[in-house]
Image (tube, grey):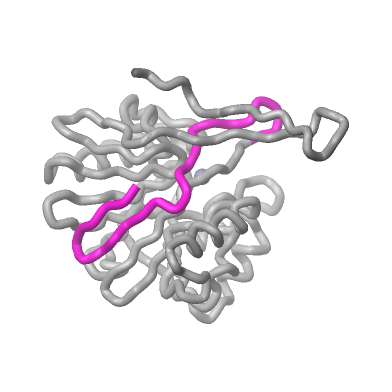
């Protein structure tokens, strides 16, 4: 999916997936966004370890090497969003000031924070801390959006006719947006206030584009969120007698005509 606005060309490199494993915890299949404009190449989050190869391939398909990226924006400090910052270590790396302070203070081994990666990030020379309300790049404003984590930031891109909001896990999927109820929140009321804020942002200008952390992008028109595109996801597994014999499990929902 591609979008243009405010001097930025936006592409979704990886579309997040709105699901969890039945017995093996969170999948962590999260959204990664590429923004090009104003002489900069910006990546939002970077997925988990398993995404390194597909992410580099998705960038290469667009003529971008990891070393070309000038700015990495991190929405929050969970492993499926923040652990791949070393791929873009020469870039300016932005994370919320409040988020980093929180992530450095969590007890080891108890949260989804990749403790070592965040500790190393806190000492990295190109790290830049971002604050609520700050214009972090031309026309892109960070907003504190707590609930999933205390210092989670969302990013609002002021477009030409339509604004775009990079939600990541402040609103992980369409069901959370429409019901204003959330899974994996430290405080449901805090998450709900964040989702109320997102709806308020969407009321300002028509046709708001929302990009959640674990779902398809959506356009909001007249208070209704409509998903754009379709999911493609699956698993291949070795249950046979040869390496070439793989069983494929399609994880995309049935198409509704
Ligand atoms: Zn996530």
Queried whether the magenta region covers residue 88, the answer comes back as: no
Residue 97 seen from this side: no
**Image quadrant occupied by the C terminus:** top left
Q: Above or below — where is 222 with respect to 256?
A: below
Say left or right for 45 vs 209: right
214 or 114: nearer the viewer: 214
How far across and how far down the image is residue 6, in percent? 19, 62
Name the residue rendered at 48%, 42% in the picture. Answer: 16
58 or 170: nearer the viewer: 58
Q: Residue furthest right?
A: 241
How far across and how far down the image is residue 237, in percent? 74, 33
Q: Give the quarter of the image for residue 62.
A: bottom left
**Over which residues does the magenta segment extend?**
1-25
Q: Give the quarter of the image for residue 216.
A: top left
Say left or right for 57 vs 73: right
Q: Give the quarter of the image for residue 70.
A: bottom left
Name the residue rendered at 45%, 75% in the picture. Answer: 92
Q: Above or below — where is 177 with respect to 9?
A: above
Name the residue rendered at 55%, 43% in the picture. Answer: 29
Q: Above or below — where is 124 with respect to 61?
A: below
Residue 41 seen from this side: yes
Queried whether the magenta region covers residue 23, the answer comes back as: yes
79 or 232: nearer the viewer: 232
How far across and how far down the image is residue 224, in percent? 22, 28
């Amino acid at each position: 999916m591609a979008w243009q606005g405010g001097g930025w060309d936006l592409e979704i490199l990886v579309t997040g997936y709105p699901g969890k494993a039945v017995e093996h915890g969170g999948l962590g299949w999260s959204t990664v966004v590429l923004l090009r404009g104003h002489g900069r190449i910006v990546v939002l989050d970077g997925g988990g370890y398993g995404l390194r190869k597909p992410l580099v391939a998705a960038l290469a398909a667009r003529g971008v090497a990891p070393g070309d990226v000038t700015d990495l924006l991190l929405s929050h400090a969970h492993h499926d969003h923040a652990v791949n910052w070393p791929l873009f270590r020469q870039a300016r790396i932005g994370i919320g000031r409040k988020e980093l302070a929180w992530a450095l203070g969590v007890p080891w081994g108890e949260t989804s924070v990749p403790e070592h990666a965040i500790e190393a990030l806190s000492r990295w020379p190109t790290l830049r801390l971002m604050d609520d309300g700050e214009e972090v790049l031309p026309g892109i404003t960070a907003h504190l959006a707590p609930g999933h984590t205390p210092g989670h930031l969302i990013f609002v891109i002021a477009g030409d006719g339509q604004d775009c909001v990079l939600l990541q896990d402040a609103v992980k999927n369409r069901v959370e947006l429409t019901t204003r109820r959330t899974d994996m929140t430290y405080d449901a009321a805090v998450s709900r206030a964040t989702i109320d804020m997102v709806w308020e942002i969407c009321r300002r200008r028509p046709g708001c584009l929302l990009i959640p952390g674990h779902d398809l992008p959506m356009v909001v028109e007249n208070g209704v969120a409509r998903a754009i595109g379709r999911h493609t996801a699956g698993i291949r597994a070795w249950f046979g007698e040869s390496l070439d014999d793989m069983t494929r499990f399609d994880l995309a929902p049935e198409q509704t005509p």
